[in-house]
């Protein structure tokens, strides 16, 4: 069918691709296997709005501008000054407000370039000392969800470190209602542009129209019958927990000892928990060969530091494991250009957070979706061939 594009997958990548194609005048059908849209952007229903995956955006990438231009970001949440005073690090088993000097020196060294072909631990260890390199690798596990971030490409880790911790106004954005609220707005916008959205519709064979496959890489591998569609990603256990409010609860804790991360959801967005309660998510990367149960035990010990006395105040909790679902990780010698290509031939284009597009995590999904949509529009005769 001329001018028709099929999108497989109703996460943020699929919705981005569908909107882009519809805006260019294509007729679009989007298929989502689940009953609900959102993929890893889904959240549980109120009164405890906990995320399956993503909950923050970074505003220093083009994907944020794309969402904002269309009014899809909605109202932003902001933590109050008292929350900001309760941000810090787990260092040597206790909560501290300050980071080690070597780690801070690294952050001030933003003009330095790190090599692609060396691992971060070796490269940073030589320049800033082994302890600072380990602290930095564990701090940035907030974005890698990996128990051994030091083994990754120095350039990859360096870039993440400077985006997340750089000494400039923070670019992190919390949207009220979380990613689920953005997903809901994207779905309404897509429908207003005429996109046909079919939920509960798992695609098992590729259609003969130009198609954007915006699924996790494992599903794309099965759908395209292409075993080469693989990339490495993180592995962590998670604890979502609602507690009766206590002034000692910390807002954010980066775990320099073991790579965990703790964050309040409700300090910046009170709509996600009942009055008088606070909602938090903590995660801990799983070590090679470690059982998820052991990783959960380490996570709970980290929670003892981030949320003193939390075990007696629990009103709701949920645990989960995320494996291969936290975005692409690049090993020494690899950059984003080496990840599975977006254009697959025969009018098929890949989008998602493990394909060849720049950015981190959800940002890769949006950036790749924009490129995949351009490819599909060209194949559908809606854009001139380059
Ligand atoms: C714990 C965790 C925390 C994260 N935190 C952040 C964060 O704070 N910020 C950030 O930017 N990113 C974060 N991420 C990453 C972010 O969630 C993902 O990058 C993003 O949601 C990926 O979107 P997507 O649309 O590419 O894939 P998905 O959200 O996985 O969507 C793919 C969809 O395709 C559907 N599907 C699969 N196969 C088929 C089929 N055959 N037919 C039809 N439909 C199909 C699936 O059901 C799914 O809905 C996090 C991830 C995790 C796991």
Image (tube, grey):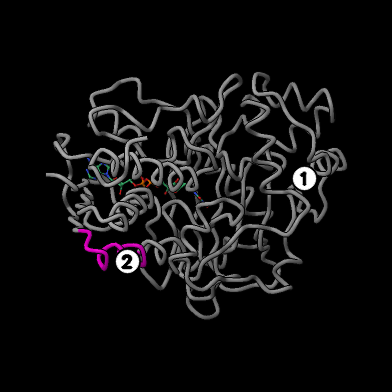
Name the quadrant of the C terminus: top left
Residue 185 included in the magenta stretch of the image: yes
- Residue 140: image x %, image y %? 65, 41
Residue 325 x/y as whole percent: 43, 40
Q: In the image, which disc is placed on residue 189? A: 2
Q: Secondary structure at mark 2?
A: helix
In magenta segment, residue 303: no
Residue 306 image-quadrant placement: bottom right
Q: Residue at x 73, y 73 (%)?
A: 81
Q: Name the spot of residue 169 as percent of width and height, x first.
A: 73, 59
Badge 1, how many Cα within 10 Å: few under 14, some, many 20+?
A: some
Disc 1 versus disc 2: nearer the observer: 2
Seen at 50% across and 28% down, the residue is 337
Label 1 to label 2: alpha-carbon separation:
45 Å
Q: In the depicted view, which residue is nearer to us: 312 or 321? A: 321
- Pointer 1: what residue? 91
Mark sitting earlier along the chain (1/2): 1
| Residue at figure coordinates x 47%, y 71% from the top left | 74
Q: Is residue 267 shown above or below 32?
A: below
Tag 1 secondary structure: strand
Indicate left or right for 372 with 25 as reference: right
Question: What's the magenta region?
Answer: 184-195
């Amino acid at each position: 069918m001329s001018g028709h594009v099929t999108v497989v997958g109703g996460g943020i990548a699929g919705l981005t691709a569908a909107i882009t194609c519809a805006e260019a005048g294509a007729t679009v059908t989007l298929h989502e296997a689940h009953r609900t849209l959102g993929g890893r952007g889904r959240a549980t229903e109120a009164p405890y709005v906990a995320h399956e995956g993503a909950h923050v955006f970074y505003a220093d990438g083009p994907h944020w501008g794309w969402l904002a231009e269309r009014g899809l970001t909605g109202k932003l949440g902001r933590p109050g000054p008292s929350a900001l005073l309760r941000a810090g690090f787990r260092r040597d088993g206790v909560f501290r407000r300050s980071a080690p000097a070597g780690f801070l020196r690294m952050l001030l060294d933003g003009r330095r370039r790190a090599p692609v072909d060396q691992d971060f631990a070796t490269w940073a260890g030589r320049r800033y000392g082994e302890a600072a390199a380990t602290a930095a690798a564990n701090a940035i596990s907030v974005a890698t969800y990996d128990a051994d971030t030091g083994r990754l490409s120095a350039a990859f880790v360096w870039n993440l470190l400077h985006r997340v911790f750089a000494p400039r106004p923070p670019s992190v954005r919390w949207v009220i209602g979380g990613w689920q609220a953005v997903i809901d707005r994207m779905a309404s916008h897509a429908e207003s542009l005429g996109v046909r959205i079919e939920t509960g519709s798992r695609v098992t064979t590729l259609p003969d129209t130009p198609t954007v496959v915006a699924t996790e890489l494992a599903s794309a591998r099965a759908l395209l019958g292409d075993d080469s569609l693989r990339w490495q990603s993180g592995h962590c256990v998670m604890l979502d927990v609602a507690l009766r409010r206590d002034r000692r609860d910390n807002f954010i804790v980066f775990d320099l000892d073991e790579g965990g991360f703790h964050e309040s959801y409700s300090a910046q967005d009170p709509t996600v928990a009942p009055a008088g309660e606070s909602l938090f998510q903590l995660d801990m990367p799983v070590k090679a060969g470690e059982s998820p149960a052991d990783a959960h035990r380490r996570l709970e010990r980290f929670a003892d530091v981030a949320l003193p006395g939390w075990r007696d105040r629990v009103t709701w909790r949920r645990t989960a494991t995320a494996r291969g679902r936290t975005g692409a990780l690049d090993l020494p010698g690899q950059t984003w250009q080496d990840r599975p290509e977006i254009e697959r031939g025969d009018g098929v284009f890949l989008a998602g957070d493990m394909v060849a597009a720049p950015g981190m995590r959800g940002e890769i999904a949006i950036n790749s979706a924009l490129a995949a949509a351009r490819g599909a529009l060209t194949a559908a005769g809606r854009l001139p061939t380059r």
